[in-house]
Image: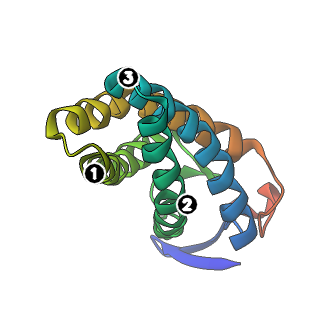
Amino acid sequence: MEKRDTGGVAVSLPKDRHLKSIFKGITWRFVAFLDTSFLSLIFTHSLVTALKISLTELITKIFLFYVHERIWLRFAFGKINGQDQKYKTLLKAISWRIFGSLDTFVIAVFITHNYTTAFSIGFLEVFTKIGLFFIHERIWMKILWGKTTTQEEYSI
């Protein structure tokens, strides 16, 4: 359990275990894989190319998501009684989308050799994936499995 100083009062903060972060990343990648596949198919008109982009992304983003998740666990702001508030979830979704869209753009350029197509896929997924990520994040916040502390420990 991690203790942080919050204006002179030490409070216990919830911390997800590594295994929970891994499972959370896997479920997100499944949702994001479907989204990227669909968007890539729309812009490339090729199922093979769409699958190349989304399967490559599957590999790179599992690692990137895990790193992103572990970094955000270090931020204490935006929590009430150990739960992330909606504005923190939104900021987290936006920061992930910046890194995620850059990754998608680079992968799509590498596979299609077409900057316009790559930009179109990366740009549209900014909107689809921020919404999907927000929903995914809020669902995982409700899952108690993998937390190192309980809600009662956060009363001050």
Q: Amino acid at mark 3?
A: His
Residue 148 shows up from this direction: yes
Give the colouring mode of the picture.
rainbow
Q: Which residue is mark 1?
A: 102
Work out whether mark 2 precedes mark 3 in sequence or the reverse, and give the earlier one: 3
Q: Is residue 79 left or right of residue 45?
A: right
Q: Which residue is mark 2?
A: 62
Residue placed at 54% from the left, 39% from the top? Answer: 32
Measured as percent of width and height from the top left, residue 64 is found at: 46, 64
Q: Nearer the viewer, residue 74 or 6?
A: 74
Q: Nearer the viewer, residue 45 or 43?
A: 45
Work out whether mark 2 precedes mark 1 in sequence or the reverse, and give the earlier one: 2
Measured as percent of width and height from the top left, residue 153 is found at: 77, 64
Q: Label 3: few (<14), some or many (≥20) within 10 Å?
A: few
Cβ–Cβ below 8 Å for labels 2 and 1?
A: no
Label 2: which secondary element? helix
Which label is found at residue 45? 3
